[in-house]
Image: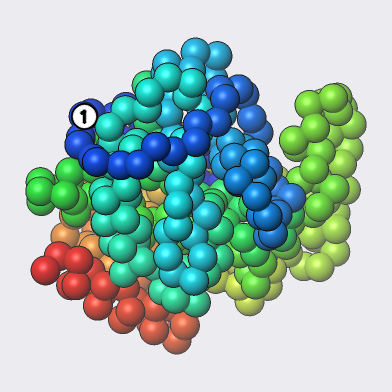
Amino acid sequence: MLNTLRRITILGLLLATVSCGSSDLPTVTQVPSAAFSVDRQHNHELSSAKDLESFAATGAECGIDERDVATMVYLPKDGELGNGVIGCSVMRAPARVRDRQLHRQLWTISQALIPDQDEGRIERVILAQDRRSDTLAFVASLDNRGHAWEYGLNLDAVNLKNKDVFEELLSTIIHEYAHILSLNDTQVIYDPVQQLAYEDHTISDVVYETITIKAERNCLGQSGIYDGDACYMPGSHIFEFFMLFWDGYGDNVFAEAVAGEVFDQNPDDFVNDYAGSAPTEDFAETFAAWLMPELEAFEIKASTEEKFQFFNSRSELRNLRHQILSGLQAVRN
């Protein structure tokens, strides 16, 4: 079972509580507090500090009370984290949000666990403090294709000197990477009309449902599997994983999984209850367990071994596992 902090995936927001740290930093620009939605139309050319401020501010919902939220937003390039911009706070940000040395340590750890072929997909990094939730980390697509991604961590969950907390951080990074791996534009298709409609709050529920139904029909027309957001394409990791391990749960499997019914009725099929909440979470949790089976967060069962065999049967995943295990050894040392 997962501990007190949760992982979250597509369209999630990083919400955390930050304890104190220390840093000797230069003054950074602050972004005014406001409620922002995720910017899926990614701007690859940021020509000025003003552009950077505006872009960074879209990375998280700031909430009504700016005292509850603080973030440091980075736009990594060529492997370097770059300069951060403080967002979502008109007051002095907490020390950990300003601690760039810690941020670079976390980015170095993340780089060790995220293979180079997908690290370049991460075009926005958010390190945040938010007192309203216990979410541990998230990833989200920055465009309508799943090519560019946002990656966030909860600074409150970071303790590089506590072995158990550190190991949970490592498994969480691997979990989030598994989402990028399985839900990028080489694996799934996102309907651009449906994606834009999701963010347009002026569109009525009836119209949105019509758009979603059309997106589902388009997916089925390509022999894919539609989960309400992404179309799993035949041959992809998530498509084949679904067909082997989720197809037998029934036609209403996605809604039942979110409601907890799939796990409640089939607890022996999953490494933990969170894995039973969606096929994508099952893939990501089992992938992390494949790399770190010794963690208490994972209960290894006969069904888990079958899913491990699925991962082992795919040469790309075996190669990635070798890279990630090397990274695990490096950061543990």
Q: Is residue 184 left or right of residue 319?
A: right
| Residue closer to the observer: 221 or 86 | 86
Does 328 sit above or below residue 281? Answer: below
Query: Residue 183, position in %: x, y?
Result: 59, 61
Res 241 seen here: no
Does 159 sit above or below residue 305? Answer: above
Q: Identify which residue is drawn at 77% across, 67% down.
A: 223
Query: Residue 185, position in %: x, y?
Result: 66, 67
| Residue closer to the observer: 142 or 79 | 79
The residue under label 1 is which amino acid type? Cys
Around disc 1, counting alpha carbons within 10 Å, would you say few (fewer than 14), some (14 to 19), or many (20 or more)? Answer: few
Q: Identify which residue is drawn at 85% across, 64% down.
A: 221
Q: Count of labels shown? A: 1
Q: Identify which residue is drawn at 84% across, 34% down.
A: 208
Give the secondary structure at mark 1.
loop
Does 201 sit above or below residue 28? Answer: above
| Residue closer to the observer: 94 or 175 | 94
Q: Is residue 300 left or right of residue 288?
A: left
Does 42 sit above or below residue 310? Answer: above
Question: Which residue corresponds to mark 1?
Answer: 20
Q: Identify which residue is drawn at 38% across, 23% down.
A: 92
Which quadrant is home to the N terminus?
top left
Residue 317 occupies quadrant: bottom left
